[in-house]
């Protein structure tokens, strides 16, 4: 199996970002429709993995924190969010 085509990888990451943007603006139907356009589960996983990696890299560049510190902080936020009841509408 060869390396993925960079153009397709970029499109996959943009699609993942679009799903998140639609969800954040409250367009749950649009987010679901866009999510359904991923050709495979592997493409979906790759898109969201690369998007998370890019976002953490941008945050690291702006904050100057180490990646370990950023991931630790993210883990704490996730743990806190898991202890909170779901908000209405989501």
Image: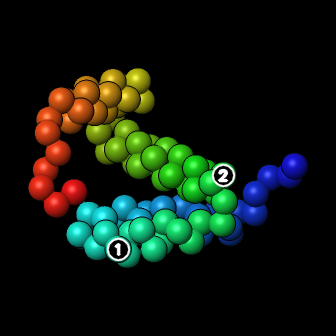
- Compare marks 1 and 2 and give the one earlier in the sequence: 1
Label 1 secondary element: helix
- Which residue is at a point 28% across and 73% down the rendered structure image? 27
Residue 74 in the image, given as x and y percentages of width and height: 31, 33
Q: Position of residue 53 (x, y in %)?
A: 49, 44
For discs 1 and 2, the disc positioned in front in the rendered view: 1
Q: Which mark is residue 67?
A: none
Label 2 crowding class (10 Å Cα cut-off): few <14, some 14-19, many 20+?
few
Q: Residue drawn 22% across and 57% down?
A: 90
As drawn, the label of residue 29 is 1
Q: How many angstroms separate mark 1 from mark 2 (CA)? A: 22 Å
> Which image quadrant is residue 32 in?
bottom left
Residue 89 is situated, as x and y percent measured from the top left of the image, at: 16, 60
State the image coordinates of residue 58 (x, y, percent, origin top left).
40, 48
Residue sitting at 86 percent across and 52 percent down?
Answer: 2
Q: Secondary structure at mark 2?
A: helix
| 29 or 81: nearer the viewer | 29
Image-based side of 41 in relation to 52, left or right: right
Is any part of residue 65 visible from this angle?
no
How many marks do you count on the picture?
2
The residue labelled by disc 2 is 42
Q: How packed is label 1: few (under 14 Cα within 10 Å), some, or many (20 or more)?
A: few
Compared to residue 66, the image places residue 12 above or below, namely below
């Amino acid at each position: 199996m060869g390396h993925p085509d960079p153009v397709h990888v970029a499109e996959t990451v943009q699609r993942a970002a679009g799903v998140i943007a639609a969800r954040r603006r409250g367009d749950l139907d649009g987010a679901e429709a866009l999510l359904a356009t991923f050709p495979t589960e592997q493409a979906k996983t790759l898109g969201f993995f690369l998007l998370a990696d890019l976002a953490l890299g941008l945050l690291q560049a702006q904050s100057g924190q180490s990646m370990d510190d950023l991931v630790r902080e993210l883990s704490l936020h996730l743990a806190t969010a898991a202890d909170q009841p779901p908000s209405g509408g989501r």
